[in-house]
């Protein structure tokens, strides 16, 4: 997983699957979009206007919790 922030666009992107994918975009709101690849795999989440939602979008707080033993095999 990779999280990136584009200050000029004020957009935060959470990449869940690496690589190049042909994606279908599903807009949840004007500011939030989901990118789906073949097989309806969620590739990423785009958040526009990130500075309104996060105190520091360039360095958002990330909490990883209870991950041991819950990772699906590749």
Image (cartoon, grey):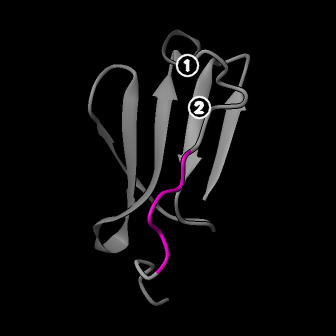
Percent x, y of residue 68: 49, 76
Q: Where 59 falls versus 9 (above or below)?
A: below
Task: In this rendered view, identify the residue nearer to me: 22 or 44.
Answer: 44
Q: Where 36 falls versus 27 (above or below)?
A: below
Mark 2 touches mark 1? (CB < 8 Å):
yes
Q: Is residue 61 left or right of residue 41?
A: right
Task: In this rendered view, identify the residue nearer to me: 54 or 46.
Answer: 54
Which quadrant is home to the N terminus? bottom right
Q: Is residue 11 left or right of residue 44?
A: right
Residue 57 within the segment the image draws in magenta: no
Label 2 sits on residue: 12
Task: In this rendered view, identify the residue nearer to me: 45 or 27.
Answer: 45
Q: Where 15 falls versus 30 (above or below)?
A: below
Which residue sits at x=26%, y=32%?
28
Specify the label residue 54 is tagged with: 1
Range of magenta residues = 63-68
Say which of marks 2 and 1 sits in front.
1
């Amino acid at each position: 997983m990779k999280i990136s922030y584009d200050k000029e666009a004020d957009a935060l992107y959470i990449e869940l699957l690496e690589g190049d994918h042909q994606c279908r975009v599903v807009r949840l709101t004007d500011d939030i979009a989901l990118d789906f690849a073949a097989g309806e795999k969620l590739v990423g989440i785009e958040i526009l206007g990130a500075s309104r939602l996060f105190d520091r979008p360039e360095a958002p707080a990330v909490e990883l919790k209870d991950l041991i033993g819950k990772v699906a095999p590749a």
